[in-house]
């Protein structure tokens, strides 16, 4: 089931095991899903894209 739920940074950190800096570094290189602006100073990530990223990493091992 694909979820279009929006995850905030603490939820992405918990789900992926990555640190904040790693997430933003990976986003800069295009190797991590981009964030969605949800407010003036707020961003979130689509849970479906985070789940796909996790599946992709699992498949590479």
Image (cartoon, rainbow, N blue to C red):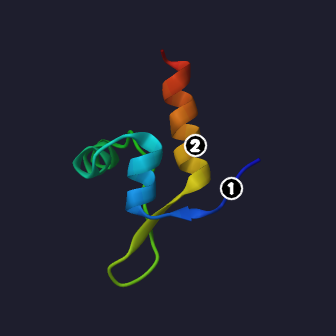
| CB atoms of marks 2 and 1 within 8 Å | yes
Question: Going 58% across and 43% down the picture, which residue do you hit?
Answer: 51
Q: Earlier in the sequence, mark 2 or mark 1?
A: 1
CA gap between label 2 and label 1 equals 9 Å
Q: Which residue is mark 1?
A: 3
Q: Is residue 40 left or right of residue 5?
A: left
Place of residue 53 in the rendered image (x, y in percent of width and height, measured from the top left): 51, 38
Place of residue 22 in the rendered image (x, y in percent of width and height, measured from the top left): 26, 43
Q: Residues within 10 Å of mark 1 (few under 14, many from 20)?
A: few
Place of residue 21 in the rendered image (x, y in percent of width and height, measured from the top left): 22, 49
Q: Point out which mark residue 59 bears.
A: none
The outermost residue toward the top is 61
Establish if 39 lies above or below 26: below
Place of residue 45 in the rendered image (x, y in percent of width and height, measured from the top left): 48, 59
Question: Going 34% across and 48% down the picture, which residue do you hit?
Answer: 27
Q: Secondary structure at mark 1?
A: loop
Establish if 57 lies above or below 7: above
The outermost residue toward the front is 14
Question: Going 56% across and 20% down the picture, which residue do you hit?
Answer: 59
Q: Secondary structure at mark 2?
A: helix
The outermost residue toward the right is 1
Q: Is residue 4 left or right of residue 38?
A: right
- How many numbered marks does the figure carry? 2
Q: Residues within 10 Å of mark 2 (few under 14, many from 20)?
A: some
Q: Which residue is mark 2?
A: 51
Question: Going 25% across and 46% down the picture, which residue do you hit?
Answer: 25
């Amino acid at each position: 089931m694909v979820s279009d739920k929006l995850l905030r940074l603490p939820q992405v950190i918990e789900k992926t095991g990555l640190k904040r800096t790693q997430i933003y570094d990976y986003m800069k290189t295009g190797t991590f899903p981009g964030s969605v602006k949800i407010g003036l100073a707020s961003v979130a990530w689509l849970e479906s894209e985070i789940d796909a990223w996790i599946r992709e990493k699992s498949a590479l091992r």
